[in-house]
Image: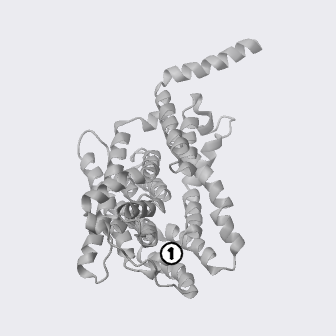
Amino acid sequence: MSDAESGISAIWQGITAVGAEPRMIAMWAIAAGLLYVGIAKRKEPLLLVPIATGILLANLPLGELIRAGGGGEPPGFIRVFQDFGLTTDLLPLLIFLGLGALTDFEPMLSNPKTLLLGAGAQAGVFFALIGALLLGMTTLFDFGLFEASSIGIIGGADGPTTIFISTRMKELGEAALGPGGVRDVVGATAVAAYSYMALVPIIQPPIIRFLTTRKERRIKMPYSYKPVSKRTKILFPIVTAILVSVLVPKASPLIGIMMFGNLLKESGVVERLSNTAQNELMNIVIILLGLAVGATMPAAVFLKPETIAIFMLGLFAFITATATGILLAKLMNLVTKDPVNPMIGAAGVSAVPMAARVVQDMAQQEDESNFLLMHAMGPNVAGVIGTATVAGVLLAVVPGLAG
C-alpha cells in the first residue's frame, strides 16, 4: 500500500468510527454545553473546563487517549491518570489536601452549633440513596446499594468526595459481586455533582424562599464572632482527624488528608508547603482529575437511561440537602436564645464558598445592612466534614449489607 493510500485509509478509519458510534456526537454536544457553562457563564470553570475537555477527548474516534494499552502499544495518555490517579484515590485525596489548606474553620469554631447545620444537610444524601434503591426495584433501572450510595453522595455537593466514594463503591461492588456486577457511575455522578455545584445560585434561592418567610430572611445575626485562639486552630485538625478516624475509620483518608492541609495553613511555620498545597499542587491535580473524570464517559457508558436517572436523583439529593439544612435552622430557633437566620442552613451543603455567597446575596436583597457571609461559612465548611464522614459511614456499612 502506498503512502497516499495509507493516509486515506487512516482518514477513512476515523470517519467510519464516527459512523459506527454516532452517539459520540451527542457527547461532543454535552462537552460543548459544559464548556459554555464554564467559560461563558463562569460557573466552576476550574473544574468544568477540564471535565468537559476530558469528555470530548474520550469520545474522539478510536479512543486513542483512553486505550487500555497492550499489543505493543502503551496505554492512552488519560488512561494513565485514570489507572494511577482515580483507582488509587490519589487525585481526590490530593484535592482534599489543597481544600484543607484553603479552608478557614474559624467561623465554625467560633459558633460550634453551626456544625449541626452542616451535619443536618447530609440528610439529602440518604433521601437520594433511598430513591435510587426504589428505582432499582423497578424493571427500568439497575441500581443496587453500591450505585445508590454513589448517587446519594451527590447531595453533599462535594465533587472530590463523590469521585472518591463512587470509585471505591465500584471496586467494592466488583469484589463482592464479581466483574460487571456493579454499574460504572463514576463519571455520571462526578459530572452531576460538579454541575449542581455550578448551579447553586440557580437551585438554592427558590428553595430558600419557599421554606422561609420574609421576616425570617431578615433576621440579623451579630456581625462579629468570638475570636479563636491560634492554639485552638492548630489543635482542631489534629483532634478532628483522630476523633473521626476512631468513630468512622473509613472516613480517615478524606478527613485525615484534609486536616493535614489545614494544619499546614494554621501552624504558620510551613508557609511554602501551605502555599504549594493551595496553589501549584492544587492546580495540577485539578487538571489531571478533571481530564480523568471526564474521560470516564465514553458514549457507550454515559448515554443510557440510568444516566438521566442519576442526574435527576442528584438534583433531588441537592434539593433535600438544602431543605433539611434550612428546616434544622428553623428548629434551632425554637430551642436557642440567640436567633439564627434559617438561610444559613442552606449553606450546610459543602459547595464552598458558593452556597455561603448565595445566602449572603439573599440577605442583602432583603436588607442591605444584613451580613451573613461569615455565619454561613460555618455550616458551609462543616458540610465538607459532614459529607466526608457520611462517605466513610457508607463505605463501612454498604459492603456488609450488600453481602
The quarter of the rendered structure image containing the C terminus is bottom left
Could you tell me which residue is drawn at 50 percent across and 58 percent down?
160
Q: In the displayed structure, would residue 27 be above or below residue 374?
A: above
Q: In the displayed structure, would residue 99 be above or below residue 6?
A: below
Q: In the displayed structure, would residue 299 be above or below residue 376?
A: above
Residue 186: in sight, yes or no? yes
Give the residue at the far front of this rendering.
368
Q: In the displayed structure, would residue 258 be above or below residue 72?
A: below
Q: How is the image coloured?
A: one colour
Q: Is residue 41 left or right of residue 390?
A: right
Q: Estimate the x, y position of residue 314 in percent, counting from the top left.
A: 36, 50
The quarter of the rendered structure image containing the N terminus is top right
Residue toward you, 62 or 264: 264
Could you tell me which residue is drawn at 23 percent across and 43 percent down?
138
Disc 1 packing (10 Å; few <14; some 14–19; many ≥20): many
Could you tell me which residue is drawn at 27 percent across and 47 percent down?
136
Q: Estimate the x, y position of residue 125 in percent, counting from the top left.
A: 34, 59
Residue toward you, 156 or 189: 156
Q: Estimate the x, y position of residue 188 in percent, counting from the top left.
A: 43, 45
Q: Tag 1, which secondary structure?
A: loop
Q: Is residue 200 left or right of residue 102?
A: left
Residue 129: in sight, yes or no? no
Q: Estimate the x, y position of residue 46 in percent, counting from the top left.
A: 57, 51
Give the residue at the far right of this rendering.
3
Write down the residue under mark 1. Answer: 105
Amino acid, disc 1: Phe
Q: Is residue 11 left or right of residue 41?
A: right
